[in-house]
Every structure is written in structure tokens, then in C-alpha cells.
């Protein structure tokens, strides 16, 4: 299982790489998904660009983008430099430090939890105040997918995937024009 373990308590696969310190500086490819794969943040227009389809964000999509850009303001020092109190954010030689092995640095999980909380809270306010489309239960699926980018080859491969992914929209099973999923 490439470093990922099955959790017997809740019956879910642990999505994190075992033993890896996610507070370390580095490049990560992260994916989160809306619960039930609802299309809440805009629409993909197939002819929005001369070659590629383009995502046109609605107000909810602009809100998510706003909180995405706030991440660097909320977590400005997640780069291995010390906090103002001298505690390290990450430590390449010893991934566990502090009382009870608690990391003092901000982990990817901390960032994702904050991002999902902020976007969910604002989305709920806008459902009440501006009649945005409702969602059942949770806005985001429980977890997130991460890939640690370890070298230039991996960076190039993921960059290629991101750039070319919109070309696949016409064949995507979650494209409402291809199925009856959200009709």
C-alpha cells in the first residue's frame, strides 16, 4: 500500500504517508472534492479559450478563491523558519519534536482544516443571506488527496496533468452534459 495504512477502528484507509512530517517545507499537489460532487463554484465553458475549456467562477467560486489566497496570509511562515518564539516550523532531521511528539509547525492538515472551515462557514452564511445553492450535510468530502512532489520529474508530470486536465472535461463522467447525475 505504498506507505498508506488501513485504519481498523473506522474502516477507512489512512490517506497520509506514514512517518512523513507534513509540516516540512516542500511542494504538494492537493485535491479536495465537494461532498456528493455537486457543481457549486461555477461552470466549465468548452469554448472559453482558443484551445482549452475555461472555468467561469460564480460568487461561490470567487469566495473559495478568496480563501485560497488567504492561506499565505494565515500561514506566512510555514517554510521551516522559526516562529517568533523560536520554535521551528519543521525539522528535516527530526520530524517529531515537542511534548508528546506534537509538531509545532503548521502541517498540510492544519491548512486544509482551516481552509475547509472558512469556506464552509462563509458558504453557509451566503446560503442564508443570498440564497446560494444548498448542500446536504457537509460542503467538502471528509479528507483530501495529497501527493508529495519529490523531484523535478514529478513536478513536470503534475504540471502537465493540471494544464491538460480541462481538455478531458467533455468526456468526464461528472460533466452533466454526459450523464443524468445532477439532473
Image (cartoon, rainbow, N blue to C red):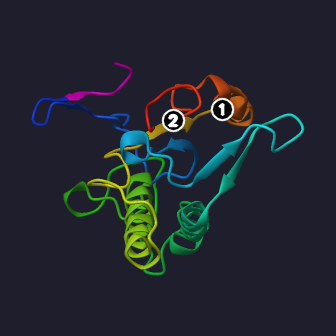
> Given the current orientation, which residue lies at the most extreme front position?
183
Residue sitting nearer the eye, 100 or 153: 153
Q: Main secondary structure of the magenta part?
A: loop
- The quarter holding residue 150 reads top right
Q: Which residue is mark 1?
A: 158
Residue 152 in the image, given as x and y percentages of width and height? 71, 32
Could you tell me which secondary element the residue under label 2 belongs to? strand
Q: Using residue 12 as the reference point, say whether residue 132 is left or right of it.
A: right
Residue at figure coordinates x 15%, y 30% from the top left: 11
Q: Are marks 2 and 1 in contact (CB under 8 Å)?
A: yes
Q: What range is drawn magenta here?
A: 1-6
Residue 174 in the image, given as x and y percentages of width and height? 51, 32
Q: Using residue 154 as the reference point, say whether residue 31 is left or right of it.
A: left
- Specify whether residue 16 is painted magenta: no
- The quarter holding residue 124 reads bottom left
Q: Give the position of the N terminus as an image quadrant.
A: top left
Residue 40 in the image, given as x and y percentages of width and height? 50, 53
Residue at figure coordinates x 48%, y 48% from the top left: 92
Crowd rating for badge 1 (residues with CA inside 10 Å; few <14, some 14–19, many 20+) = some
Vertical comparison of 108 with 151: above or below: below
Q: Using residue 163 as the reference point, say whether residue 87 is left or right of it.
A: left
Residue sitting nearer the eye, 120 or 38: 38
Residue 32 in the image, given as x and y percentages of width and height? 46, 45
Residue at figure coordinates x 46%, y 57% from the top left: 90
Q: Which residue is mark 2?
A: 147
Mark positioned earlier in the residue sequence (2 or 1): 2
Can residue 152 be seen by looking at this rendering?
no
Amino acid at each position: 500500500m505504498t506507505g498508506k495504512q488501513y485504519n481498523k477502528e473506522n474502516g477507512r484507509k489512512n490517506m497520509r504517508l506514514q512517518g512523513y512530517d507534513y509540516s516540512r517545507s516542500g511542494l504538494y499537489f492537493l485535491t479536495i472534492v465537494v461532498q456528493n460532487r455537486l457543481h457549486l463554484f461555477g461552470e466549465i465553458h468548452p469554448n472559453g479559450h482558443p484551445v482549452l475549456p475555461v472555468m467561469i467562477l460564480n460568487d461561490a467560486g470567487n469566495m473559495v478563491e478568496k480563501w485560497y489566497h488567504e492561506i499565505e496570509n494565515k500561514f506566512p511562515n510555514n517554510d521551516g523558519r522559526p516562529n517568533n518564539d523560536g520554535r521551528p516550523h519543521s525539522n528535516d532531521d527530526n520530524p517529531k519534536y515537542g511534548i508528546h511528539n506534537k509538531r509545532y509547525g503548521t502541517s498540510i492538515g492544519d491548512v486544509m482544516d482551516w481552509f475547509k472551515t472558512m469556506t464552509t462557514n462563509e458558504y453557509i452564511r451566503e446560503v442564508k443571506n443570498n440564497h446560494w445553492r444548498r448542500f446536504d450535510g457537509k460542503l467538502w468530502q471528509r479528507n483530501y488527496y495529497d501527493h508529495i512532489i519529490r523531484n523535478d520529474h514529478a513536478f513536470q508530470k503534475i504540471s502537465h496533468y493540471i494544464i491538460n486536465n480541462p481538455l478531458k472535461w467533455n468526456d468526464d463522467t461528472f460533466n452533466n452534459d454526459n450523464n443524468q447525475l445532477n439532473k
